[in-house]
């Protein structure tokens, strides 16, 4: 019997080894592959071009250059381009840019910016607190637990979405940019974020040890507060300390200078936004990997402990376009996000599926659709911008759309990016739309129970 078992074991090992060897690239396989590369005149020319030049310069589709203009039938009244510099705060800039026209109109200004640095300070402090709370809540789980591993992998970052913005503004208010302007660290965030992340990871390990030692909850909270004071110090040294109140005056379009008025960030928010209710906005998304007309929530995707997670209703593109057009017609810009690097002609500010012909360059086919690109990690939402314009034909069908970007005036078409409707279908993902433009059935779905998705889902 033992001999039989030994024989079978050796047999299966042998079979496994043969299979493994069969799956490896043999010399014969390599020769077959090499023989397919024929150095004809076109191949030699393309090899010379690609080996000495940027791929996009070679792949630029000349028949598409100049085919798209920057003219629109419907365009929101906007003024001035912002610049997030070397930071991942596109979601914050986009959200604030949605409400800039309200401030410009209210105070009769030529241009206006809210302080991004002010909200950014509180965003990182709140994210640090949320991370430490999550570590305490999962202290009984092993370190290789997926959730624990996820928390430590990215304790804080610059990223966020619409709900992150709402959580901050509801709690901390708003202020003009000149009251708390940008700093080098707010515009170049990588080192500050790296060091704060290092510190809170260290703090997280200590909190796990304290909880494992069954220390009283009061002691855990006291130590956590001490940790957050160090994060606050790091933020204040890099970004400046946020004012609790401030005085502000301004010069209007006619050149008149107003008297100083005293505000808190909360009172300024209330004055500027007026009757705008941040809860009257709904995020919708086009994700063909999931059923449409369903409400989803991303677990723990928020920036404040008491804040709201990321929620959205998944919808077909044609329905989203209808709501977006209605909002733009009514002079209301939309928070939107996309896979901006796909087919981007950065110089001309054009996003079109035909901008670059990689298939002709390499003589191969790229065949994935949007669903396949999402599932394989090839594509996903990478950048948020304000959707401000749409051009339609005589039947009302959209042809072109436009973003107000936050990369400064020197990128794209004077800071704006125009994209075709075909590009919309392939690479647009998220939109925030006022409830008043949505069908009642969509609002009803959004108000209903959400299906909870994990934060490590490939879509997010």
Image (cartoon, rainbow, N blue to C red):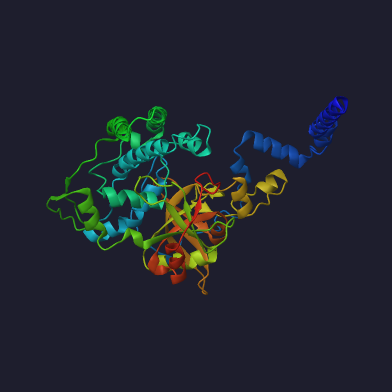
Nearest to the observer: residue 63 or residue 9: 9
Q: Residue furthest bottom?
A: 395
On screen, 22 above or below 418? above
Farthest residue to the left: give it. 259
Task: Give left or right: position of 209 versus 246.
Answer: right
| Image coords of residue 33 (percent x, y) | 80, 36
**Horizontal and vertical percent for residue 36?**
81, 39
Which of the 4 image quarters holds residue 22?
A: top right
Closest to the observer: 343 or 236? 236
Is the residue 236 above or below the residue 407 in the image?
A: above
Is residue 240 shown above or below 106? above
Q: Nearer the viewer, residue 64 or 225?
A: 225
Furthest toward the front, the residue is 1
Asked if residue 65 lies left or right of residue 132, the reply is: right
The image position of residue 82, as x and y in percent, is 36, 48
| Quarter occupied by the N terminus | top right
**Residue located 40% across and 30% down the image:** 191
Res 129 seen here? yes
> Number of callouts in the render?
0
Q: Image quarter for residue 435?
A: bottom left
Horizontal side, residue 400 vs residue 259: left or right: right
The one nearer the camera, 183 or 449, is: 449
Which residue is pictured at 17% across the width and 45% down the height?
246
In percent of width and height, residue 300 lies at 44, 46
Visible in this render: residue 113?
Answer: no
């Amino acid at each position: 019997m033992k001999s039989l078992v030994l024989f079978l074991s050796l047999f299966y090992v042998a079979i496994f080894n043969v299979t493994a060897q069969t799956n490896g690239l043999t010399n014969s396989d390599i020769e077959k592959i090499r023989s397919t590369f024929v150095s004809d005149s076109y191949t030699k020319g393309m090899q010379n071009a690609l080996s000495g030049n940027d791929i996009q310069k070679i792949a630029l589709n000349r028949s598409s250059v100049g085919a798209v203009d920057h003219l629109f039938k419907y365009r929101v009244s906007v003024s001035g381009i912002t610049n997030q510099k070397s930071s991942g705060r596109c979601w914050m800039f986009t959200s604030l840019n949605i409400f800039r026209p309200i401030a410009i109109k209210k105070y009769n200004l030529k241009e206006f910016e809210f302080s991004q640095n002010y909200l950014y300070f509180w965003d990182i402090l709140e994210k640090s607190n949320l991370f430490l709370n999550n570590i305490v809540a999962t202290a009984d789980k092993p370190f290789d637990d997926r959730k624990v591993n996820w928390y430590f992998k990215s304790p804080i970052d610059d990223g966020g979405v619409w709900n992150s913005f709402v959580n901050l503004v509801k709690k901390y208010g708003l202020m003009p940019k000149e009251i708390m302007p940008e700093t080098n660290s707010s515009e170049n965030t990588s080192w500050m974020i790296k060091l704060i992340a290092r510190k809170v990871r260290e703090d997280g390990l200590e909190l796990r040890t304290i909880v494992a030692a069954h220390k009283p909850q009061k002691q855990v909270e006291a130590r956590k507060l001490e940790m957050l004071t160090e994060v606050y110090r790091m933020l204040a040294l890099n970004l400046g300390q946020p004012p609790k109140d401030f005085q502000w005056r301004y010069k209007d379009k006619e050149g008149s200078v107003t008297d100083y008025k005293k505000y808190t960030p909360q009172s300024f928010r209330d004055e500027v936004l007026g009757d705008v209710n941040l809860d009257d906005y709904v995020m919708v998304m086009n994700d063909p990997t999931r059923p449409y007309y369903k409400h989803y929530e991303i677990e723990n995707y928020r920036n404040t402990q008491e804040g709201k997670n990321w929620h959205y209703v998944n919808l077909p593109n044609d329905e989203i376009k209808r709501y977006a057009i209605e909002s733009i017609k009514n002079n209301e810009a939309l928070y939107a996000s996309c896979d901006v690097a796909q087919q981007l002609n950065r110089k001309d500010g054009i996003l079109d599926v035909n901008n670059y012909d990689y298939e002709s360059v390499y003589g191969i086919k790229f065949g994935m659709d949007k669903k396949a690109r999402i599932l394989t990690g090839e594509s996903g939402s990478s950048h948020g911008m304000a959707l401000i314009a749409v051009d339609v034909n005589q039947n009302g069908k959209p042809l072109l759309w436009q973003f107000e970007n936050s990369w400064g005036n020197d990128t794209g078409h004077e800071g704006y990016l125009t994209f075709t409707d075909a590009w919309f279908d392939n690479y647009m993902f998220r939109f925030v739309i006022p409830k008043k433009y949505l069908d009642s059935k969509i609002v009803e779905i959004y108000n209903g129970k959400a299906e909870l998705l994990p934060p490590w889902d490939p879509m997010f």
